[in-house]
Image (cartoon, helix red, strand yellow):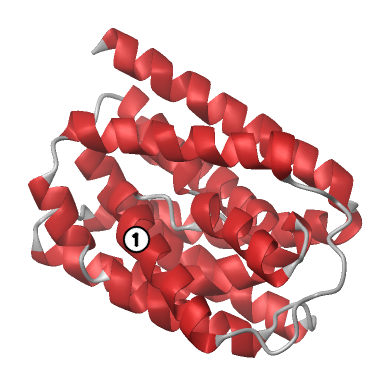
Amino acid sequence: MEWLDSVILLGLGLLSGIFAGFFGIGGGTLIVPAIMLLGLDIKTAIGISVMQMMFSSLWGSYMNYKKGNLNFDEGLWVGIGGLIGAAFSGVVVDTLSAFVLTILFLLLAIGALWRFLFKASDVVGVRRQNPNKLVLITIGALTGVFAISLGIGGGLILVPLLSLYLHINSKQAIPISLFFIIFASVSGFASLAYHGYVQYVQGATVGVASLVGVSIGIALLRVIDAKKHRYALVALYALVIAAMIQKLLES
């Protein structure tokens, strides 16, 4: 690995960690398009992204738990679902072409943008008490099987679903989403590694740098209000969509 590549990967790790802590998305929404722009294929990018997620989600969830921001019970059931769903990620990546994976990535980003731009509300009403565990597991499983297959951790799908079901805003959903990524990324990493899609040195480089970034992201999340956080999500999804469309047009 050339020194310039190492510097780029460290920078991606730092930024992806900030995104993980602030948006609860694992960082893959940034890493996958960025690594593809460096000339690597989407399947290699997914492997690096999922390895990074293990670093940032473990450290970020520990910080959220210590600060009292994480609902452990809700996160646990969603995480169990993610563990089940992500176990099939290697099969999905092995079966689908890079073009199909890119299209799926794009469609999910568009759906999330639509949700936060036109359907989300900063006034979410009374938080759902005693949510159905089977529903939480199902949400986690569906998110895990598709999100890890795309190398995006799950927040891109999970944050809108949690906001809708639990009657919480995007800011409140972030700690649960980040905790979910622990389960999904560990399961997804094992599956992707078995199928030969993990580059360990690059993944570890990005992962270590993300530990610093996730600390910054969580600190930023604490001081921003819910409305501004939703606007930030809209801007993120718009940038991701633009980058992926450009990649498709160039291919």
Q: Position of residue 74 (x, y in %)?
A: 61, 83
How many marks overall?
1
Q: Residue, x 80% and y 75% (percent of image)?
A: 127
Q: Nearer the viewer, residue 216 or 128?
A: 128
Residue for badge 1? 51
Residue 211 left/right relative to 207: right
Q: Is residue 131 left or right of residue 2?
A: right
- Residue extending furthest top? 250
Label 1 Cα crowd, 10 Å radius (few <14 / some 14-19 / many 20+): many
Above or below, 222 relative to 41:
below
The image position of residue 52, as x and y in percent, is: 41, 58
Q: Amino acid at mark 1?
A: Met
Q: Is residue 208 visible?
A: yes
Residue at image x 71%, y 34%? 117
Q: Is residue 245 above or below residue 250?
A: below
Percent coordinates x, y for residue 133 in the rendering? 53, 87
* Up/down of 152 relative to 32, above or below: below
Query: Is residue 204 at all visible to an observer of this figure?
Result: no
Which SS class for mark 1? helix
Residue 8 in which image quadrant = top left
Name the quarter where the N terminus is drawn.
top left
Image point (70%, 80%), residue name: 70
